[in-house]
Amino acid sequence: QVQLVESGGGLVQAGGSSRLSCAASGSIVGIRAMGWYRQAPGKQRELVTVITGGGTTTYADSVKGRFNISRDNAKNTVYLQMDSLEPEDTAVYYCNAKIIYTDYTLRNYWGQGTQVTVSS
Protein backbone atom coordinates (compact mmCIF):
# COMPACT_ATOMS: atom_id res chain seq x y z
CA GLN A 1 0.00 0.00 0.00
CA VAL A 2 1.01 3.58 -0.66
CA GLN A 3 -0.32 6.68 1.03
CA LEU A 4 -0.05 10.32 0.02
CA VAL A 5 -0.65 12.68 2.90
CA GLU A 6 -1.17 16.34 2.12
CA SER A 7 -0.91 19.31 4.44
CA GLY A 8 -1.28 23.04 4.13
CA GLY A 9 -3.91 25.07 2.38
CA GLY A 10 -6.75 26.97 3.95
CA LEU A 11 -7.99 30.52 3.56
CA VAL A 12 -5.69 33.23 2.26
CA GLN A 13 -6.21 36.76 0.98
CA ALA A 14 -5.57 37.66 -2.63
CA GLY A 15 -1.93 38.52 -3.12
CA GLY A 16 -0.91 36.29 -0.28
CA SER A 17 1.04 33.06 -0.14
CA SER A 18 0.43 29.50 0.90
CA ARG A 19 2.47 26.32 0.96
CA LEU A 20 1.31 22.76 0.40
CA SER A 21 3.23 19.61 1.11
CA CYS A 22 2.63 15.99 0.23
CA ALA A 23 4.48 13.03 1.70
CA ALA A 24 4.42 9.58 0.12
CA SER A 25 4.90 6.50 2.25
CA GLY A 26 4.46 2.75 2.02
CA SER A 27 5.68 0.11 -0.40
CA ILE A 28 7.77 2.40 -2.59
CA VAL A 29 10.79 1.41 -4.64
CA GLY A 30 11.02 4.76 -6.35
CA ILE A 31 8.99 7.76 -7.47
CA ARG A 32 9.02 8.70 -11.13
CA ALA A 33 7.22 12.03 -10.74
CA MET A 34 5.18 14.00 -8.26
CA GLY A 35 2.86 16.87 -8.89
CA TRP A 36 -0.21 18.88 -8.07
CA TYR A 37 -3.59 19.08 -9.72
CA ARG A 38 -6.55 21.21 -8.75
CA GLN A 39 -10.28 21.15 -9.20
CA ALA A 40 -12.47 24.20 -8.83
CA PRO A 41 -16.24 23.90 -8.32
CA GLY A 42 -17.97 22.96 -11.55
CA LYS A 43 -14.70 22.45 -13.40
CA GLN A 44 -12.57 19.49 -14.37
CA ARG A 45 -9.42 18.59 -12.52
CA GLU A 46 -6.42 20.28 -14.14
CA LEU A 47 -2.67 19.97 -13.94
CA VAL A 48 -0.97 22.69 -11.92
CA THR A 49 2.62 21.51 -11.89
CA VAL A 50 4.76 18.38 -11.91
CA ILE A 51 8.37 17.57 -11.07
CA THR A 52 10.28 14.50 -12.19
CA GLY A 53 12.80 12.58 -10.15
CA GLY A 54 15.54 14.42 -12.00
CA GLY A 55 14.05 17.78 -11.11
CA THR A 56 12.48 18.74 -14.43
CA THR A 57 9.40 20.87 -13.83
CA THR A 58 6.30 21.72 -15.81
CA TYR A 59 3.78 24.43 -14.92
CA ALA A 60 0.36 25.40 -16.17
CA ASP A 61 0.48 28.77 -17.90
CA SER A 62 -1.89 30.21 -15.33
CA VAL A 63 0.56 29.68 -12.46
CA LYS A 64 3.92 30.29 -14.13
CA GLY A 65 5.96 32.82 -12.22
CA ARG A 66 3.72 32.55 -9.15
CA PHE A 67 3.95 28.91 -8.07
CA ASN A 68 7.06 26.86 -7.40
CA ILE A 69 7.28 23.10 -6.99
CA SER A 70 10.13 21.42 -5.19
CA ARG A 71 10.89 17.92 -4.06
CA ASP A 72 12.84 16.21 -1.29
CA ASN A 73 13.67 12.79 -2.69
CA ALA A 74 15.06 11.54 0.62
CA LYS A 75 11.70 12.24 2.28
CA ASN A 76 9.51 11.30 -0.71
CA THR A 77 7.90 14.69 -0.27
CA VAL A 78 6.83 17.36 -2.71
CA TYR A 79 6.10 20.99 -1.90
CA LEU A 80 4.08 23.65 -3.66
CA GLN A 81 4.87 27.25 -2.82
CA MET A 82 2.09 29.49 -4.05
CA ASP A 83 2.66 33.24 -4.19
CA SER A 84 0.60 36.14 -5.51
CA LEU A 85 -2.52 34.07 -5.08
CA GLU A 86 -5.63 35.07 -6.98
CA PRO A 87 -9.29 34.22 -6.33
CA GLU A 88 -9.11 32.09 -9.50
CA ASP A 89 -6.66 29.81 -7.68
CA THR A 90 -9.43 28.72 -5.32
CA ALA A 91 -9.80 24.96 -5.65
CA VAL A 92 -9.18 21.62 -4.03
CA TYR A 93 -5.54 20.76 -4.64
CA TYR A 94 -4.60 17.12 -5.11
CA CYS A 95 -1.17 15.60 -4.85
CA ASN A 96 -0.29 13.01 -7.48
CA ALA A 97 2.59 10.56 -7.61
CA LYS A 98 3.78 8.09 -10.22
CA ILE A 99 5.28 5.43 -7.99
CA ILE A 100 7.33 2.36 -8.71
CA TYR A 101 5.74 -0.24 -6.48
CA THR A 102 7.49 -3.17 -4.84
CA ASP A 103 6.55 -5.40 -7.78
CA TYR A 104 8.29 -2.88 -10.06
CA THR A 105 5.09 -1.79 -11.73
CA LEU A 106 4.42 1.92 -12.20
CA ARG A 107 1.31 3.00 -10.34
CA ASN A 108 -0.61 6.26 -10.07
CA TYR A 109 -1.67 7.55 -6.65
CA TRP A 110 -3.67 10.54 -5.42
CA GLY A 111 -3.79 12.40 -2.16
CA GLN A 112 -7.04 13.15 -0.39
CA GLY A 113 -7.10 16.76 -1.51
CA THR A 114 -6.72 19.99 0.42
CA GLN A 115 -8.83 23.11 0.02
CA VAL A 116 -7.23 26.41 -0.91
CA THR A 117 -9.55 29.40 -0.81
CA VAL A 118 -8.36 32.82 -1.93
CA SER A 119 -10.54 35.73 -0.85
CA SER A 120 -10.67 38.96 -2.82
Image (cartoon, rainbow, N blue to C red):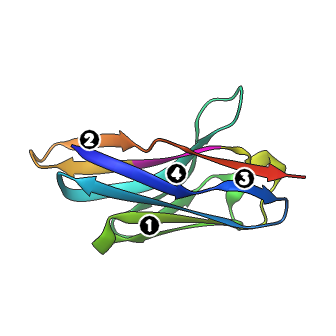
Sort mark 1 into few (<14), some (14-19) or many (20+) by Cα contacts within 10 Å: few
Could you say which quadrant of the image residue 47 lies in?
A: top right
Chain-order first, disc 4 or disc 1: 4
Could you say which quadrant of the image residue 11 lies in?
A: bottom right
Chain-order first, disc 2 or disc 3: 3
Could you say which quadrant of the image residue 91 lies in?
A: top right
* Residue indicated by mark 2: 107
Chain-order first, disc 2 or disc 1: 1
* Residue indicated by mark 4: 36
* Residue indicated by mark 1: 56
17 inside magenta stretch: no
* Residue indicated by mark 3: 62
Please state which of residues 32 and 81 is positioned toward the viewer in this rendering: 81
Residue 68, how many percent across, how many down?
Answer: 60, 68
Chain-order first, disc 3 or disc 4: 4
Alpha-carbon distance for marks 4 and 1?
Answer: 14 Å
Alpha-carbon distance for marks 2 and 4?
Answer: 16 Å
